[in-house]
Image (spheres, coloured by chain):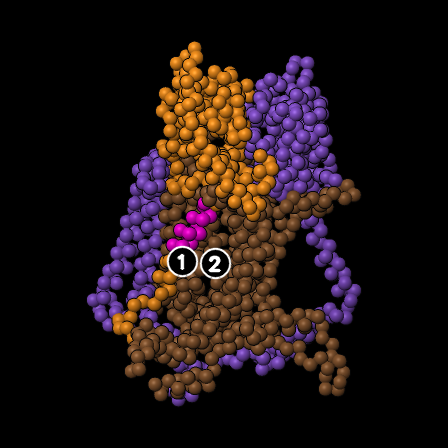
Amino acid sequence: MKKLSARRRHPLAAVVVLLLALAATGGLYAAFAPASKAQADDTAQSLAIDEGKKLYSVGCASCHGTGGQGTTDGPSLVGVGSAAVDFQVGTGRMPAQQPGAQVPKKKVIYSQAQIDQLAAYVASLGAGPVIPTKKQVDPAGADIAKGGDLFRSNCAQCHNFTGEGGALSNGKYAPSLEGVDPKHIYEAMQTGPQSMPSFPDTTMPEQQKRDIIAYIQTVNSSQSENPGGLKLGGLGPVSEGLFAWIFGLGALIAVAIWVAAHTAKAKKS
Amino acid sequence: MSSQEIPEENLPAEQEAAHGAVEVAEDPFADPGLPAHKPRIQDIDERAAKRSERAVALMFTLSMLATVGFIASYVIFPVDKIVYIWPFGHVSALNFSLGLTLGVALFTIGAGAVHWARTLMSDVEVADDRHAIEATPEVKAKVLADFAAGAEESAFGRRKLIRNTMFGALALVPLSGVVLLRDLGPLPEKKLRNTMWAKGKQLINMNTMEPLRPEDVAVGSLTFAMPEGLEESAHDFQNQIAKAALMIIRIEPDNIKDKREREWAHEGIVAFSKICTHVGCPISLYEQQTHHVLCPCHQSTFDLSDGARVIFGPAGHALPQLRIGVNSEGNLEALGDFEEPVGPAFWERG
Amino acid sequence: MSTATDTQRKAPAGERVADWADGRLGIYSLAKANMRKIFPDHWSFMLGEVALYSFIIIILTGVYLTLFFQPSMGEVVYHGSYEPMQGIRMSEAYASTLDISFDVRGGLLVRQIHHWAALIFLAGMFVHMMRVFFTGAFRKPREINWLFGFLLFVLGMFTGFTGYSLPDDLLSGTGVRFTQGAILSMPIVGTYISMFLFGGEFPGHDFVARFYSIHILLLPGIMLGLLVAHLILVFYHKHTQFAGPGRTNKNVVGMPLMPVYMAKAGGFFFLVFGIIAVIAAIATINPIWNIGPYRPDQVSTGAQPDWYMGFAEGLIRVMPGWEINLWGHTLVLGVFIPLMVFGLVLAVIAVYPFVESWITGDKREHHILDRPRNAPTRTAFGVAWITEYVVVFIGGANDLWATHFHLSLNAISWFVRIFIFAGPIIAFIVTRRICLGLQRRDKEKVLHGRESGIIKRLPHGEFVEIHEPLGPEQLHTLTAHEQYEPVEIGPTVDENGVKRKVSALQKLRARLSKGYYGENNQIAKPTVEEYKEITSGHGHH
């Protein structure tokens, strides 16, 4: 990864990326085409795991290996737990479309039932964090202020004060947290997807995760209060400066032009 | 001045105003003089002037109404009332209404005055002569003579003893002011070299305020720690945490490239200063896949699997590492203070 | 009127008050010179007024804020009305800013007006300064006023910065930390200045109170003095004007202060205040309640200063981390060089008027403004300077450009590192070419007239576009600008065959002068002969 990041600025990087993209497109096609062959293996596992495995072979095995052991294209899934699957697939990040600095959030292509089956299968490969229950992620009754303090200590450095997101190195980024399902926020903290480090229960207990979720819900949702008016993206001085220049100074100059202009004459010369 | 060497003819000639059509015919570029004033509609049509008058009066009236609206808003809306107004979002009703009414009250006064000036006041352009700023030679001679007389009468030039001692006194007296600034703060001494960390101090998880145990710290996780015995309510908490804050991560020992880093770690658990060595931001954008940590302020990037050396950005040296081990209770503890000063570099750092 | 009847009638009340004041202040003599003072009309002459009025607005709102703000770093546990901060430990400065925002009715509005006006104040000064630069209004006799204006801009930056730091929130605290790190980088004295400024180690308990007195008293006091001096000089010099019929270097054409400019300039104050009030009503600025109280171990991404400090932020972000350790001492070049470059870039624009007057050797007064195209080298230099400013500025927000345009942060840093050098050069060359092109077009217009857009077919079938000749007013306006000849060093041997010494400075000046006014570096104005030849030739068609 480090070597790759160091070469991103190489003049040929664009060509390499293009070639990789072409290769990936071909690879994806190859992955989907022969998929029907690899689903016969009936075992004595539960129905969900069974169904999950079928889905897995179709959508995931090309990168993560037929048994979840991982390949050069994707990490091993042994021990990542059902929470990781629910997060990655439930936010549409997986299956990934193309290689890049980061796999973006996109439209979810599986139903929740299918995601649960996939999660059950991956969980069966090795123990890991499990999908939280409704109660575990319920922000009701949580300490918002404490959540804010925890958020500023643990999360704001990447996700910004109110979770608007921010840049990481070499084109990677911490995504915006606006409108993210509390369950997925919880799972992200548990499992540490992609560049994000994990915040396991041993160092950040369940209650604190709930506090953080409550804080995010308070400051960054469609119901959040912005007493001062437009929040300008919640990005701080940069967007405020742009606004002051474009709208503030812009309006003032428009008015100045009116003040200084000659009044219309009765007759054109 | 060196510019005196420039001959006058190198400087461009100024164009003089032309007087009459003959000169214009001679020199097509000559100044034809101020154009004749052309009347506005309001100058010749009293009905248009009346319309302007009404428009100005309307604006001033609007201003009065807006001020009444301002006072009404102040009285009506509670300070914590939130309303949804598209496209601004869930905003404070009071802030929104006060700001808008104040804005309208002020803007209409301005717009009324400007409209009045533009349409009803005379718009005949007038020329005003400029006068030379430089004094005439006579004035200059008089001033210089006066000055010479004054200087002579003071005997400033002759009585050198007076002059020199006065300069001395005036030069010294501001020193009192400078001396008074001494107690603004203490001398630096060794203050920037030490932190609160010492041998045997346990690492306290800043989320739970409990001592950290090695088994709590998973590979790929990120935890922040502070020294045992530091209380948030302590008077010097801010000063201490500004130096002592730690970033705890765990890397498979085989993946640690730097030998010293591996030795100072405990089973792959490494403790680095959270304070950036550039200008001191709390650096903590940890990318767990690459083990890079990025500073949110100026993007210095450090490789935590390789002695936290700088791989990008403006920082000048690696993040200091704290040597850690496990005490008899099985908790993580420091094996001493940082071996080098934490935070931004300074002259005496060496 | 005769004096005899004057003593008989009883003067109206207003006149009696004025008489009273005149007997003590001499207001009639003052008014005689100034009441009907002429001001020329041009929208760009009002940019300075934008700055002036925002400054007044800042003072008015600032006084209000001091009534509620507690400039103290004493720690309290918050129990006010803002829910997400309940029970959080913070300084009194931060807590009182929360109170102003949530508990004082209209407090939030005044805070937002104050901060928006500050951003607009600096922006107004910046564009005003650029207007003065590009029109050559800084030339004699206005060089001192240029310096006053420049000082106002620099002091405005620091007043803004100290004010921004007062709420002691996490974002501004990070900015203060950056300042402290930059101070530490100063060789020899760095640690001492840091200890003295913060009353010990960072952050200590003193800086808010100290910044407060600097922000509300020291800097604004100096600025107010400079501002008054600036305005007195504007009155004394009388305003500059663009060339045009009837406008010469010896007069000023426009409308009188009383009544037109009193209404226009006075009205403009209300317009500026009104617009800023509306902005404060609809757009949040610096929502410190979202940002949280300052703690030196917490931070948020996207940590930027207000726009006027973005230039410093950019320099520090793109600088490579050079650090030299010698004889037990550390030279922190990675921080110290940007600190120096920051001052240098500002100083370059400040001394420019003196450099230009040295190159031209022109000692005359200039009251007619240049159109930017007619001073191509100056304009190109100004654009190069702005380009430098903007490139560095982009570097100051590299993380936000990265996320919003899906670019790599590192790539942007490298872009800035290269364009910090290449950008101004490219801008210089391109701008000068554009200026020369516009000068050529003006010359065409003078000699051949304006393209009328009417196509005429000649008897033999050729199509021509009819050019309308310009009127005398336009002809004058387009040829009124002055053109300098380049300075010559002259013969290096005088008439007696003795070698004349030519200093390196004189050579430099000759080269610069050639660069400014030499062949190919300005388009010679059309001459009367050229014009007559062409226009008489036209008569035969």
Residue to which mark 2 is pinned: C127
Disc 1, SS:
helix
Chain B rendering hue: purple
Left or right of B323 on screen, residue B274: left
Span shown in magenta? A239-251
C439 or B63: nearer the eye?
C439
Left or right of C462 on screen, residue B267: right
- Pinpoint residue C433: horizontal percent, then vertical percent: 51, 67
Q: CA distance from mark 2 to mark 1?
A: 10 Å
Chain A rendering hue: orange
Q: Residue at 68% of width from left, 39% of height from top?
A: B317
Instruction: Judge whether C6 appears above or below C494 on screen.
Output: above
Chain C rendering hue: brown
Residue C483 visible here = yes
Q: Residue at 36% of width from left, 79% of height from top?
A: C469
- Pinpoint residue C216: horizontal percent, then vertical percent: 53, 47
Q: Quadrant of the N terminus of chain A?
A: top right
Q: Main secondary structure of the magenta part?
A: helix
